[in-house]
Image (cartoon, helix red, strand yellow):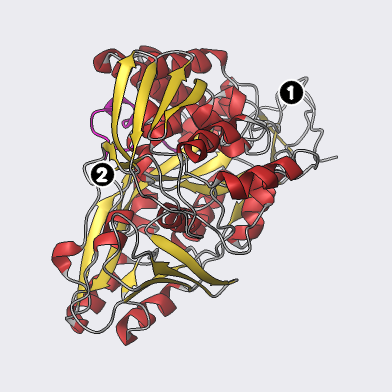
Amino acid sequence: MNGIKTLLRTATAMAVGLGVLWSGAASADQIRQLKILSRPQAAQPQEYQTIQLIAQEWRKLGLDVKVELMPWEQMADLVWYNRDKWDITGWQMVGRPERSDPDEIVFNLFHSTTAEKGYNFVGYNNPEFDKVAEAQRSEVDQEKRKQLIYKAQEILAADQPNLMLVHPRSVFAFDKTIWNPDTIVEQSGIGIKNAWTFIGATPLGDQKDMIVNSSDNVIAINPLYISGSTDSWITELVWDRLLRIGPDGLPQPWSAVSYDWVDGTTIDVTLRSGMKWHDGKPVTADDVVFSFTAPQGEEAPMYKPFTRNIKSVEKRDDNVVRFVLEKPSAAFLTATLAKVNLIPKHIWEPILADLSSKTENAESYQEPSPIGSGPFKFSSWRASEEVVLEANGDHFNAPKMARWILRIVPNTEAAVGMLRKGEVNFLSDYTGDPKVLQTVAAEDGDLEIVATTDIGFRYVAFNNRRPPMDDAAFRNALSMAINRKLIVGAAFKGFAVPSNSVVSPALGFWHNEATDNFETGTELAKKILADAGYRMEGGRLAYPEGKTETLGK
């Protein structure tokens, strides 16, 4: 902590009022053109404007920066599956309920073991951070764990593997003449776009279909694949979990009616009776065991981090499953039992067996008609157009609506227009100017708006595998060049909180406020680069002496 403050105070004091002299006493390799990926303006205006502002600031440092626009599915495929082929990208972590506990973000997003195939797609590798991330997992004393989470945030603030930008204030709107406002649930750090709303929203009249929107396409409807926010809404509704994160941000029984810690590493979970898969077959304890053992293999790598600490899972009787952990886990209820989807063994066991002899894994497999046990059943999917789910009337918590219909609307203005015309009655994805939406609601009279500070965050991901982003000093300089308050005002119209931490202020207990206050500016960024040996060569920023450009040749 003190090291971060000292670094920033020293850099600021040396830079303010002095400027930076760039010398080129010896010839040095210019840094190649750096490409920043962004989604198009019509689909993600906040991200697009943010990336444009960032590119302008980085050019002031002598960098040749090119913004390259890509639709979400293409960008996600490149960044996730071609991890050494890109430089920098706009990105976001969405506020999923299970992220109410910081473990998923602190460990899975940055631990070195998840770099090859998991969440750590930027390739961050810091042994000191790994030790802290591991320690917080097994620390059951909440205050001690809090200090470890604080320490993790401090290390990340010093290393800047990502350029953190903002925690958005997510804005939603719904037609209050169609949906009873008393049944619309605001979940802590998530907002009103959540499973509790979708299950409990009660129609006031004959319109019993909830029609929501998304600016991004659906990539997959797959219980073993974790992709963007849009896909996750569907996953939470089609597949059940043993626990579900409640509106208060805490885990509570769901498909399990109870759980009992036998000791510090053993927990017995009692299953709810009478549950059925959407194909009519019963949900059994064997299915539950399979759901948690399948991700431990290589065929479902995305969920492997959430089950890595499980030493064994066994069926005790028809209604009880026992989990034995390798070591105590403070986040097990939230990060595992409320995270892993229950999947039918009779469907997925042969699929995974077939994939075991192929180069593909479960992430690329798409069931023709996805089968879960959740409160909604899959009905249809027209790529780039819509997904339709039907209420599962046999579910123990059956929805009040008839259908949940997701419409893909890449253009933000078009989505608002559809809301006004009744073609959408729940605006679940809005990335435009919140003040415009407020004006629309005032004129319309039937719309209610809710804004919530998100658990999730927007950031710029540096590919730590590729020079010069493999240099912490370079990443720090690029990060310190960016005024987050400017981003909040210009791109988010004030509906965001500036960020330098992956742990949102919405998670007040876990958020380290000391990481929030830091100096930024072009001169400070130049000073950091100069101290690290970077110099100007032919009007362009060049590597320190002895380091050569390899990727641009």
Residue appearing at x 52%, y 44% in the figure: 460
**Residue 99 position within the rendered picture, expressed as x and y whole percent measured from the top left:** 38, 38
Main SS, magenta residues: loop
Q: Which quadrant is home to the N terminus?
A: top left
Highlighted range, magenta: 502-521
Asked whether residue 530 appears in the rendered view, the answer is no
Identify the image quadrant of residue 157. top left
The residue lying at 56 percent from left, 41 percent from top is: 461
Q: Is residue 54 above or below residue 192?
A: above
> Closer to the camera: disc 1 or disc 2?
2
Q: Quadrant of residue 316?
A: top left
Q: Residue beneath label 1, please?
A: 25
Going by the numbered disc 2, the residue's amino acid type is: Gly
The quarter in which the C terminus is drawn is top right
Residue lying at the far left of the rendered structure? 182
Q: Earlier in the sequence, mark 1 or mark 2?
A: 1
Where is mark 2, residue-wise?
Answer: 246
- Is residue 209 a member of the stretch shown in magenta? no
Q: Mark 1: which amino acid?
A: Ala
In the picture, measured across the screen, residue 504 lies left or right of residue 234, that is left
Disc 1 and disc 2 in contact, CB within 8 angstroms: no
Q: Is residue 310 visible?
A: yes
Q: Residue most toward the bottom?
A: 421
